[in-house]
């Protein structure tokens, strides 16, 4: 009986692969069937090759043509750019005369816009090389670039193949203080060379935009840390990354819980390093939380132990220290802890917890099913603080059990509908955004359907910021965008039996979704936010006023896995992996996935590699502009966690960025100092923790004669990170603030009239009732 059952498994796997059966696969297999499994793998690979020549034939041709620009991209990174461009094979190129464009006041001085929309001129290879020589003599140097095959039209009997190549070039002109971005879409008409390989016959650059800025980059690197050097012998990871005032002196420390370090803030941008926990966690989970959970006035720490799956509570003490023996939460072992959010959900005066877990695809031969609404991950938990040092799991009774198996990356407890209780936002991979309203007693109602398809995403993280400067905090869901998915949609490719999967490609890969909130708390996604939608395979994010012009900007980290070549695994995912298997494990498919993913990914080729971090500066209600290279923040390394914080206490928001190195599976930590805009003013509010009141959940609002601002102190936002309990507002050229109002989690209000600008105001809770 066992033998017969085992023999059926490869057949079921094959049926699932080609789309004839969308049901779960039984994952039980006989380990003695290794040889038969190998034969079956060959059949699966043969079937994939057949699909590449039938259903996905046009995409196969697109990838073949894309290789021309992948080689260009690789060579530009590794050789003299002028030599590479001189040798690039093509017949003719069309250039438009530069035409100055209107340059809105983005808040960053010195930015000029030009488009190549003037009189067109067609150059041959010799003339193009002369142009390159002239640029070289004038001191123009290519620093980095990015190339994506956005659209492909296969050749027909009457017309050659055509493509749209989205490109971005980052150049320096004579010095680091003259920076140029060239971005836009190349219209490519293809031909074949003597060997039958595709080469560009005509490249039309009309419409390319040139953006230049003269002046010092706003950000300068001040630290590049390696955990192997900072903490030898410990886990080689910095995250979870947390910034918080641990000792109550008004200065925020940097905690890198992954390698058990804290960088003590000594003031004036100086830090001293020491151990974070006396007995650190050997292999910490991805999430951590700093908050006063027992109400004694000291900051406590909650973190996960990946080896045991335990969730641990370390009670805080004097001077930002923690007790040796942690309390272990009474919940099942956590397999994928990825976010912890704190907030008082029932109004009893103590902090409750939402625990979110992420489950990776491919594990055991499984794949999230359906990929656009998966609820097949590790369980999330809502834990009520009993006030006596214990927590109770109320996930089911709170109304959250229906979607408690999302593949959760981030979550926050925040008042969405302005009724002064904390609602819940959950952002998950392979589904997107879920919204829950709280009745004030800790029972939640799901209102996600109000968003329709605008909730879908490969959700990676989230943050809050006022995108239209109306004084109401809005929401950003950071999601993955995919050139491959858009190209498949443009080709009209749909695998038979999976029409719904094809329909959901566009909403799932929309990218970053920036929602605006009205006075009733309802969310909408206005068109002016589209400029910040596509940043790549995005991870962490930070929303703050980086240029101090009075509006909220957005920084997004990018890049999945970068190998030697930018050749992308993405087509394999969208054409094959996505349809292979179900939520349940399967040994045969597991072998297939391991074979595919271990064939050079991260070593020889990439998966959304070499994608640069994006700095979207904001022109409220008008649009967003990615000025990252001009600002000095378009880093090419694969990035993960991001925190914006004033590390040197000078009033500007600096950056901490965590780099992930796939070749060694380790991290680095980069700190960047922001010089800001000296013509602009600012103001900050630091909330001090006290035994009577935690700042988490506090709402800060501010007014001037011209406008108003607001910020809520939340946790669980970002990616494996926690920012400080500080509200920082850029003022632009406003010189007077009329009022700051603090509404504490218990509803009590403290008001401060005409506070001084260009300084921080440290505020502690004072009972008013």
Image (cartoon, helix red, strand yellow):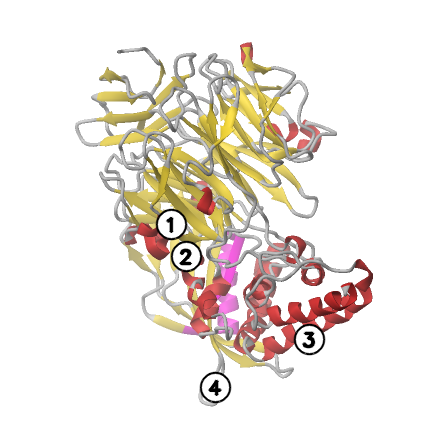
Does residue 722 appear in the picture of this structure? yes
Q: Nearer the viewer, residue 346 or 303?
A: 346
Residue labelled with disc 1: 513
Residue drawn at (57%, 80%) of the image? 54
**Image coords of residue 459 (percent x, y):** 46, 48
Residue labelled with disc 2: 510
Sort mark 3 into few (<14), some (14-19) or many (20+) by Cα contacts within 10 Å. Answer: few
- Does the magenta segment cover residue 138? yes
Question: Which of the two marks, 2 or 4, is nearer to us in this view?
Answer: 2
Q: Is residue 303 above or below residue 689?
A: below
Residue labelled with disc 3: 46
Distance of label 2 from label 1 (alpha carbons): 7 Å
- Does the magenta segment cover residue 6? no
Picture quarter with the N terminus: bottom right
Distance of label 3 from label 4 (alpha carbons): 27 Å
Residue labelled with disc 4: 156
Upstream in sequence: badge 3 or badge 2: 3
Q: Is residue 413 above or below residue 508?
A: above
Upstream in sequence: badge 2 or badge 4: 4
Distance of label 4 from label 1 (alpha carbons): 37 Å
Question: Which of the two marks, 3 or 2, is nearer to us in this view?
Answer: 3
**Side of 713 relative to 247 (left or right):** left
Q: Are marks 4 and 1 in contact (CB under 8 Å)?
A: no
Upstream in sequence: badge 4 or badge 1: 4
């Amino acid at each position: 009986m066992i033998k017969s059952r085992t023999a059926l498994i490869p057949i079921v796997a094959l049926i699932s692969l080609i789309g004839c059966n969308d049901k779960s696969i039984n994952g039980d297999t006989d380990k003695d069937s290794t040889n038969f499994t190998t034969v079956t793998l060959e059949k699966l690979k043969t079937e994939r090759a057949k699909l590449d020549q039938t259903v996905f034939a046009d995409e196969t041709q697109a990838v073949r043509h894309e290789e021309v620009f992948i080689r260009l991209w690789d060579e530009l990174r590794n050789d003299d750019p002028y030599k590479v461009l001189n040798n690039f094979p093509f017949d003719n190129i069309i250039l438009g005369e530069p035409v100055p464009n209107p340059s809105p006041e983005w808040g960053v001085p010195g930015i000029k816009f030009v488009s190549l929309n003037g009189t067109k001129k067609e150059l041959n290879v010799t003339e193009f090389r002369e142009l390159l020589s002239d640029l070289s003599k004038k001191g123009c140097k290519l620093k980095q670039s990015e190339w994506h095959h956005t659209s492909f039209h296969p050749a027909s009997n009457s017309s050659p193949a055509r493509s749209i190549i989205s490109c971005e070039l980052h150049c320096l002109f004579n010095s680091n203080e003259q920076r140029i971005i060239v971005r836009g879409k190349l219209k490519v008409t293809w031909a074949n060379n003597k060997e039958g390989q595709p080469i560009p016959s005509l490249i039309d650059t009309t419409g390319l935009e040139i953006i230049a800025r003269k002046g010092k980059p706003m950000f300068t690197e001040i630290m590049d840390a390696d955990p192997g050097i900072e903490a030898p012998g410990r886990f080689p990871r910095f995250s979870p990354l947390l910034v918080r005032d641990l000792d109550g002196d008004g200065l925020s420390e940097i905690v890198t819980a992954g390698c058990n370090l804290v960088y003590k803030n000594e003031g004036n941008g100086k830090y001293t390093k020491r151990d974070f926990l006396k007995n650190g966690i050997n292999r910490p989970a991805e999430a951590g939380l700093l908050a006063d959970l027992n109400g004694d006035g000291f900051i406590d720490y909650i973190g996960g132990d990946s080896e045991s799956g335990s969730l641990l509570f370390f009670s805080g003490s004097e001077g930002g220290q923690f007790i040796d023996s942690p309390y272990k939460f009474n919940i099942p072992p956590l397999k994928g802890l990825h976010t912890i959010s704190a907030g008082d959900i029932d109004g009893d005066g103590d902090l409750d917890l939402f625990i979110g877990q992420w489950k990776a695809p491919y594990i055991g031969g499984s794949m999230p099913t359906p990929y656009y609404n998966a609820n097949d991950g590790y369980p999330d938990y809502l834990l009520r603080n009993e006030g006596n040092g214990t927590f109770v799991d109320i996930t089911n009774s709170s109304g959250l059990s229906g979607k408690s198996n999302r593949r959760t990356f981030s979550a926050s407890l925040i008042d969405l509908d302005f009724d002064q209780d904390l609602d819940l936002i959950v952002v998950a991979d392979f589904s997107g955004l879920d919204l829950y309203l709280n009745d004030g007693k800790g029972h939640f109602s799901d209102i996600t359907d109000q968003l329709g398809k605008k909730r879908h995403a490969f959700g990676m993280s989230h943050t809050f910021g006022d995108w239209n400067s109306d004084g109401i905090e809005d929401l950003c869901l950071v999601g993955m965008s995919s050139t491959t998915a858009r190209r498949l949609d443009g080709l009209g490719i749909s695998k038979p039996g999976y029409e719904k999967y094809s329909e959901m490609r566009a909403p799932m890969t929309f990218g970053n979704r920036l929602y605006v909130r009205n006075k009733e708390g309802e969310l909408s996604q206005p068109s002016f936010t589209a400029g910040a939608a596509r940043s790549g395979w995005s991870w962490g994010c930070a929303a703050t006023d980086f240029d101090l012009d009075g509006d909220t900007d957005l920084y997004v980290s990018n890049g999945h896995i970068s190998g030697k070549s930018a050749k992308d695994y993405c087509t394999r995912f969208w054409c094959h992996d996505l349809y292979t298997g179900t939520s349940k494990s399967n040994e045969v498919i597991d072998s297939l996935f391991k074979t595919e993913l271990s064939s050079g990914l991260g070593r020889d080729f990439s998966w959304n590699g070499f994608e640069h971090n994006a700095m979207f500066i904001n022109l409220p209600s008008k649009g967003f502009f990615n000025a990252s290279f001009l600002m000095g923040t378009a880093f090419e390394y694969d990035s993960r966690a991001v925190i914006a914080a004033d590390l040197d206490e000078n009033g500007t928001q600096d950056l901490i960025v965590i780099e992930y190195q796939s070749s060694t599976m380790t991290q680095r930590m980069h700190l960047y100092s922001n010089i800001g805009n000296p013509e602009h003013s600012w103001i900050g509010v630091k909330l001090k923790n006290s035994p009577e009141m935690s700042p988490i959940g506090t709402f800060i609002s501010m007014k001037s004669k011209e406008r108003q601002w607001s910020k809520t102190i939340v946790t669980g936002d970002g990616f494996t990170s926690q920012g400080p309990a500080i509200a920082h507002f850029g003022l632009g050229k406003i010189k007077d603030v009329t009022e700051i109002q603090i509404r504490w989690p218990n509803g009590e209000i403290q008001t401060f009239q005409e506070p001084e600008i260009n300084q921080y105001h440290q505020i502690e809770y004072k009972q008013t009732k």
